[in-house]
Image: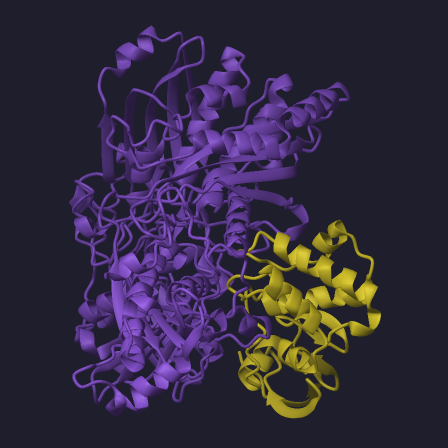
Amino acid sequence: MSARDELPVQGAEQTLTRGHVGSPDPRPNARRLLQGRGVYIDDLRLPRLAHVVFLRSPHAHARIVRVDSSRARQAPGVIAIFDGATIAQVCKPWVGVLAHLKGIRSPTQYPLAMERACWQGEPVIAVVAQTRAQGEDARDLVEIEWETLPALVDMDDALAGNPVLHPELGDNICFQREVDTGGIDQVFAQADIVVEETFHFGRHTGVCPEGRAILADYNAAEHSLTVHHATQAPHMMHDIISRHLDIPEANVRVICHDVGGAYGIKVHVYPDEMCTAAIAMLLRRPVKFQADRMESFVSDIHAREHKATVRLAATKDGRILGFDLHDLTAIGPYSVYPRTSGIEGNQVVNLTGGPYRHSHYRARMQAVFTNKNVTCQYRAVGHPIAVAITEGIVDLAAQRLNIDPAEFRRRNLIPDDAYPYAFPSGIRFEKLSHHQCLERLLALMNYEGLRADQAQARERGCYRGIGLAAMIEVTNPSAAFYGVGGARISSQDGATLRLEPTGALTVLCSVTEQGQGTETVFAQIAADTVGISMDKVRVITGDTATTPYGGGTWGSRGAGIGGEAVLQSGRALRANILEAAAAILACDRATLEVANDAIVDRLSLRPLLTLAELGRICYYRPDTLPPGFQSELMVTRHYVPRDYAFAFTNGIQASWVEVDTETGFVKLLGHWCVEDCGTVINPLLVDEQIRGGVVQGIGAALFEECCYDDAGQMLNAHLGDYLVPMAGEMPDIVCAHVQTPTHTSELGAKGAGEAGTAGAPAAVMNAINDALVPLEARVTAQPFTPERILAALGRV
Amino acid sequence: MALPETEITLRVNGETVRKRVEPRQHLIDFLREGLDLTGSHVGCEHGVCGACTVRVDGRIVRGCLMLAVQADGRSVETIEGVSDSGELADLQHAFHQRNALQCGFCTPGMLLCAGELLATTPAATREQIREHISGNYCRCTGYQAIVDAIETTLASRRANPAGAGT
């Protein structure tokens, strides 16, 4: 009997509901965080630890004429000072391109700037000292003579090649892509209506509560490097550190401790972090870099600086015919390694128009180099752009046709019985639930009631609006995302399960934890699959020396891919436990079952042997087992999606706002999100993750923007001026789920972590514009600040 | 630049501590680097995010906006001390049950901030809770679970005043 036959956990169209999976279990690993007893990188204490601080370019674009570190070297506590050329001797540079993004280009990037700096914040000189304060003191004594160069700040200037930032590339285009299903000009020419809008998206960033951090500890005797790293992808970093610092793979170990927020920010290769690892080698001692808030703003990746013009053609009875898109995005001076800065725009092309049945699609995107901080993948990558331009233009079409926005969506969302479904552009959907989600949302929010409230409010000069935003979301990415392009990033994850002699269960998984609750959902899955109680399960993640190899946490993949690996590993371990039990009890294995921490009779559920007793016998008294029998109480299984490039999910959000037309302030009155992530493993965790994502999306819609001046200086690089959502302005958020499990795995779980961020900006935008309809005003440039709203109203 | 160190004497989580510190050193850096009390976190170092919230003489302060020398002769409490005393155990339990944290970086500051509301405003409304914690930045949760957990704790303390913190 195969392991799969023993326990039909999930039948067709059913969710896995046995025991812990599906229940709102609190996170065991949250207890230490609640007492301040977590361990983040900056909490580690190592002997001979040195601290590195970076002198960063104060200019957006400048040549380094001369560096004089002589005074700095004499400062108290200084251990060493390094420039780009010195670090380049031990750390190979990189080029952030991938083969499947055809034509993508980027110049070679070094850990520290070599001859010139290309953005304000680029690390130039590394100062190592006994304490961080001493390092900062000494940094102030480093003298650099700069020759400033023209700063390329505007994306249209960049597109025009005015000037060309990297002359060896010939122009400023990093990556461009076109999709054309054909015949679109004719369709648009013959359509009853065509609507067009240009949307602007403000560049913003992740603002992790904990800044980026790395502590690299070099052992010269072994030529080994242990890297304590606040990262989402330890195996990716393991490989990169090994190759770029020329340390054998076996001599590298990457350990993630508690990570204070990541959201995609901590999944990239950062020059200052690579430099820190190189310095640990050069100084033969542990070296730590902890980014402070102000340098985080100019060195953490930014995202989302886009200008997108979209057209939609429809029939007069409200049937969408096609979308025509041109997206321009500015990515900074380098494409970020190793995931590239082309993915965000690529996603915009892939996802625009995605929820709606349509026959014609044309999209063109261009990513251009500029002298601002680099951009790369940040939570929901491309989705907030694609959802906003799609939902913005869909609302405009509905308004033009005088059709209620909910009804317009009802007419155009891909029918729930149309799956599997493929767009002419090649995107394939296994099974989505747009209409179930829409109807659920409308009921939850009392759509008709809010419309009545809106009408009454307008009569008294109060402008309220409802915004809807349907979305599709890329989750559980296969090797199609990075691997096929040559990136050494695993799309597969693994789980090792070990039954301990006491009957406890240890789970080691390659997916990492940054607070999402991955360790908890793995414990839930393992407990159910093996037949053990949650309190006997211990989960270990984030250590390349002990866990299976895998991708880590990004792309809404942790629960869906890592969870399936745990499930399959649990199945296999359970089968091995039953083999051992049959050997001990001298009975037919088919009569046995594992439940409640014991071997039980399958029919009567009568306990026959505790797992603790089984463990004791297998580990300490194997001499009593039948001749030739060897127990195997530790198993490893891996999982990678193969059937589809991505497990697409869907959902819909609604925002209910009031716009103060005197001040331009937006008050969030309510927010709803109905999402379909397949099997819900832990509703407590998934709801809060969605809410957090929604609030991050609200931040993009209303507050967050990295503002640059014409010289390429970021003007608001601190938390006083860069506004983030705080508790006072946020509404309560109602979450609900439709569950359409993916059949590409037995667990059936799809991703959920990015859904909130993907749809919230569009919902808020549409709500504001709905509120402003009577005033014939519209806003299309995020964030929707009071100033922009007043400008739209003609008041400033 | 560094100035000569000066000696301070204070109580930290009930223990008397005598240390030499640089006059420029912030209280949060003194607690973390000088005393290895790493439960309080450094988030922005300019008084906005609230991750470094600690108590001085019973009132919450931003550890990055106060110098260590200003704590001379005073009593400082951190999340470690408050956890060991059990004073906020009910709030911590409510946070756990409601999953009012994800990465946990803001949590110690959030708990101390909320603890002050529990002590001063037992009948606080949801809006007052949101207002009170609006100086503490959380990027993960969306705040709602935090508000729920504080609201639950307020209600249970009102129902059973003797049970606070146990």
Q: Where is residue A543 shown, x and y percent of the image?
A: 33, 73
* Colour setup of the view: by chain
Q: Quadrant of the C terminus of chain A?
A: top right
Tell me what residue is drawn at x 62 percent, y 55 percent: B145
Q: Is residue A610 left or right of residue A165?
A: right
Is B77 situated above or below A686? below
| Residue in the foreground of this view, choosing between A749 and A447 | A749
| Residue in the foreground of this view, choosing between A671 and A608 | A608
Q: Where is residue A654 shown, x and y percent of the image?
A: 56, 34
Is A26 situated above or below A606? above
Tell me what residue is drawn at x 73 percent, y 63 percent: B153
Q: To which quarter of the image does residue A65 belong?
A: bottom left
Q: To which quarter of the image does residue A172 belong?
A: top left
The colour chain A appears in is purple
Write down which chain is painted yellow: B
Tell me what residue is drawn at x 16 percent, y 83 percent: A628
Q: Quadrant of the N terminus of chain A?
A: bottom left
Q: Where is residue A35 shown, x and y percent of the image?
A: 59, 75
